[in-house]
Image (spheres, grey):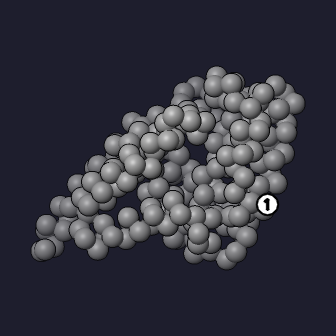
Amino acid sequence: MDKQERLQKQLEFTLELDKLKYIERQSYVADGSRHENDSEHSWHLALMAMLFSEYANEKVDVLRVIKMVLIHDAVEIDAGDTYAYDTAGNATKREREEKAADRIFNILPNDQANEMRGLWEEFEAGETPEARFANALDRVQPIMLNDITGGRAWREHGVAATQVLTRNKNTHLGSETLWNHVEGLVEKNQQLGNLQ
């Protein structure tokens, strides 16, 4: 593959990921005016990776974590965003996302396609220090947004505190500090009636 063809594939992938701006999530932005999109979510996680890396349980390669969180939801371009508490949607999520990963990452030149797919698989498996920390960030960020918006998305979907704690039960594997913060936010929002 010549340089021009390589650049073309990279540009195509970059434009494909622009579609993340149109994938709406259930969380609201901090002022509660609208739903957040996948692009905003991924950017927010990258920022959190830079700022909160000192709270990771283990030393992490911050650049690797940033790469992981920037591409972890790329598959939602095809698979859509599956709400955390949607039991039926979560039953088919992995299958839909693997099919999307096959298409989307293979837009890139082979070496980068393999790297991006590998990062996505690593994030999904959650077995490395970087993946555990990236997953912790991915769990904490929506809770932060729910807290600042008075539990708006939680209230709309009738979410219970036990559901939030169960979904986030592995957050401590990436960061005990962030997990302790999350537990406090859940307790606070349960007391306020934002969580059942």
Q: Is residue 81 above or below residue 122?
A: above
Q: Position of residue 7 (x, y in %)?
A: 20, 65
| Label 1: element kind | helix
> Which residue is drawn at the image coordinates 52% and 71% (left, top)?
63
Residue shown at 51% from the left, 41% from the top: 90
Q: Position of residue 181 (x, y in %)?
A: 80, 51
Q: Left or right: 43 with respect to 154?
A: left
Q: Reply above or below: 95 against 162.
A: below
- Above-or-below relation of 46 to 94: below
Which residue appears at 68% of the width and 64% of the height?
174
Q: Is residue 29 visible?
A: no
| Residue at figure coordinates x 70%, y 68% from the top left | 56
| Residue 23 x, y percent position in the rendering | 42, 37
Question: Can the viewer see residue 89?
Answer: yes
Residue 164, placed above or below residue 149: below
Res 161 quadrant in image: top right
Q: Amino acid at mark 1?
A: Thr
Which residue is under mark 1?
177
10 Å crowding of disc 1: few (<14), some (14-19), many (20+):
some
Quarter of the image that includes the N terminus: bottom left
**Residue 44 drawn at (x, y percent):** 56, 50
Q: Quadrant of residue 129?
A: bottom right
